[in-house]
Image (cartoon, rainbow, N blue to C red):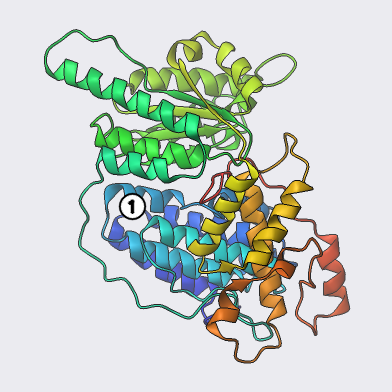
Amino acid sequence: MTGAGGTSLQDALSGLLAVATRAGVAESVARAEALSLAAALAESAPGASADWAAVTPGFGTQDFFDAAVRGRRWRGAPTAVLTDLVAQGSAEKVPYAEALAEVASAACSLGEPTMRVIGNASVAAAAQLQAAGARQQVQVGATPTTAAPAVEAKPAVEEKPAEPERTVEELLAELDELTGLAKVKREVHRQVAVLRVEKLRVEAGLKSPTITRHLVFTGNPGTGKTTVARLVSGIYKALGLLSKGQLIEVDRSELVAGYLGQTATKTAEVVASAVGGVLFIDEAYSLTAGELGADQYGREAVDTLVKEMEDRRDDLVVIVAGYPEPMEDFIAANPGLASRFRTTIAFEDYTDDELTDILTGLAEGADYELTANALDEFKVILASTRRDRSFGNGRFARNMLEAAIGRHAWRLRDVTAPTTEQLRQILAEDLTDEEPETAVPDKPAVAAELDSAVPEQPVVPDEDEQGETA
């Protein structure tokens, strides 16, 4: 199967691995990451698992959905390898982002072509390119029977050998430019001031109290926690508190193994990969949740985490995140956690105006433009949407855009030569709740039945950031 530009997933993987080799990234790591991203983008397409397995010998349907779970956080955020390359100022960060965008495009060809997957891929490709400072060049999701939802190609950005490391001031300015989060911004600025003075006092030979750098982020899904964690990792590096500044994002499934005794090793390996940067643990309370407290596996993970935090305290920061009340229980569940996590930063839900700004920013990042009527329609949708604990905040805006991109492509399916304006503009009708037909017109009836029978996999809370959206 081939993607929009005739690139198959196998070819896209080959291109990505070539860049990874130049960047010094292990081939197995880059391949696993790309396959997870492709699975996450195509998981709702009937037959996608079979096509995906065709390029992953020895893997089956369950492996496809397991990979999709791991890759969902990258539907709106840079992947772990790309984040590391950006933190390093690697000369390969733009080529790697472009290779990931090609993987996203190729993912559109897995299984029966659907408009939903095209929307997912467009937003994911834009997130990778934006993170590396590249402009969107890859046309995502065109199929023989649908119009391409992406705009015309733009000239490639000339890559420089290396970039100077970003300063604290530059990173704080980027933080301040984020939509909303006024209280979060004030607290991060305060933390930076305290840590900077502590570092200067130590360098001057003065006594200084040891201030824990580990943080607790509380808030509902989609409130910007991962975005801010990524900036914090860069800020701590710029302050000289961390050697590398990468962000490693995990949840319970990536810390806990299938057997007792293996969890300690698995957790220690994850922590080791984060040394020099920030380990971000989403839904951390899942390690200690339950009527009887932590299960044996969760307890083993927490005990190992506490030990590793102590052993690597000079070059590691851990940020744990989740809903407010469960996070209080999590910190109280282990004395070692309570002594290391003393600063909690609360992330509030976004207002309607802030969500509209986020949607607009996401659209611009993917080279789309929402008309005035489309923005009015989005506000109407927001006004009628229930704001309970399950509301996705920034993720809600991202999901709306992904669906709108799919409807936009379907609306242009019979337009032989759409104008650039038509390719860019999202109309009010593209934001309606009614789902368009997701299959190509001549799709067999059996496949059409599968479309309605295969539900979209639930979205996990870790893909929750605002321009990547959480």
Q: What secondary structure is marked by label 1?
A: helix
Q: Nearer the viewer, residue 73 or 372?
A: 372
Q: Is residue 205 left or right of residue 416?
A: left
Q: Nearer the viewer, residue 55 or 396?
A: 396
Classify residue 390 by image quadrant. top right
Q: Nearer the viewer, residue 374 or 292?
A: 374
Q: Residue at x 17, y 16 (%)?
A: 202
Relative to 87, residue 90 above or below: below
- The location of residue 166, given as percent across then percent down, is 26, 45
- The location of residue 341, given as percent across then percent down, is 46, 17
Say if residue 59 shows up in the picture. Answer: no
Residue extending furthest bottom?
Answer: 416
- The location of residue 73, given as percent across then percent down, is 56, 48
Residue at mark 1: 85
Q: Residue at x 80, y 73 (%)?
A: 437
Q: Amino acid at mark 1?
A: Leu
Quarter that holds the N terminus: bottom right
Quarter that holds the C terminus: top right
- The location of residue 64, given as percent across then percent down, is 65, 57
Relative to 461, residue 125 above or below: below
Relative to 249, residue 356 above or below: below
Local crowd size for mark 1, using a 10 Å CA cut-off: few (<14), some (14–19), many (≥20): many
Q: Residue at x 59, y 32 (%)?
A: 348
Q: Nearer the viewer, residue 453 or 1?
A: 453
Say if residue 327 shows up in the picture. Answer: yes
